[in-house]
Image (cartoon, grey):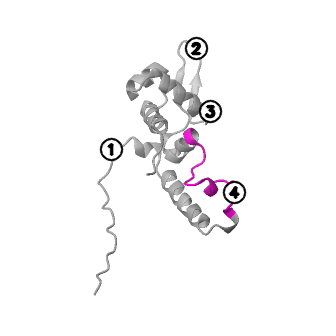
Amino acid sequence: MLRVSKLTDYATVVMTVLAEAGSDVLSAQVLAERARLEIPTVSKLLKQLVHAGLVESFRGVNGGYRIARSPELISVAEIVVAMEGPIGMTECSVTSGLCGHEHHCGVRGNWQRINQAIAEALASVTLADMTKPPGPKRPVPTPLRVALA
C-alpha cells in the first residue's frame, strides 16, 4: 500500500491551518489547537516546515509562525518532500547506484515512469486546493474483462 507517514499527513493539516490564517502569525499552541494535534508534534512539524522554507518563524512576545508563500504557490509535493525527502516509489527511481541489479534490471525504467506520474499528481494539487471541501468522487475505472469462448 502506498501512503504518506502520519507526520506528513499532520504537516498538511498544519499547513492548511496556516493557509487559512493568511498573513496572521500564529503561535505553536494556537496551531496545535486549531489542527487538533499535540503541541510536541506540531513543534516537530514546524521545525521541518521552516527548514524547507514553507513556513516562516518569528521570535519574541508576538512571535509564532505563518505561511511563507501564497497557498496557491505551495504544492502537496513540496510538503511531502519537506517531510519525507525525495518522492520515490523505489530507491532506484530516485537515486542510481544503490542496487547491484540496476544495470540489468528490466523494470527500473518503468518504476521511474510511475514515480514521475505520482510526483506530477502531487505537484498538481496546491495547498489552496487542500483547504477546499473535496469535489465529487471520480469513478474508478473498471478493469477490462475478456470473455473466453
Identify which residue is drawn at 53% across, 41% down: 79
Location of mark 3 (residue): 51
Above/below status of 125 relative to 108 = above
Q: Secondary structure at mark 1?
A: loop
Res 30 quadrant in image = top left
Identify which amino acid the numbered label 3 is placed on: His
Residue 42 among those drawn in magenta: no
**Disc 1 from disc 3: Cα separation:** 29 Å
Numbered range of the magenta stretch: 83-102
Task: Report x, y in % for residue 60.
Answer: 58, 14
**Disc 2 from disc 4: Cα separation:** 45 Å
Frontmost residue, 23 versus 88: 88
Identify which amino acid the numbered label 4 is placed on: Ser
- What numbered label is drawn on residue 96? 4
As drawn, which residue projects farthest toward the top? 61
| Left or right of 136 on screen, residue 46 | right
**Disc 4 from disc 3: Cα separation:** 26 Å
Location of mark 1 (residue): 133
| Left or right of 135 on screen, residue 22 | right
Q: Residues within 10 Å of mark 2 (few under 14, many from 20)?
A: few
Count of picture labels: 4
Task: Report x, y in % for residue 44.
Answer: 54, 27
As drawn, which residue projects farthest toward the front? 100
Q: Nearer the viewer, mark 2 or mark 4?
A: 4
**Disc 4 from disc 1: Cα separation:** 39 Å
Is label 4 in contact with label 1 (beta carbons under 8 Å)? no
Identify which amino acid the numbered label 1 is placed on: Pro
**Mark nearer the N terminus (4 vs 3):** 3
Inspect this view and state whether residue 62 appears: yes
Q: Residues within 10 Å of mark 1 (few under 14, many from 20)?
A: few
Is label 1 in contact with label 3 (beta carbons under 8 Å)? no
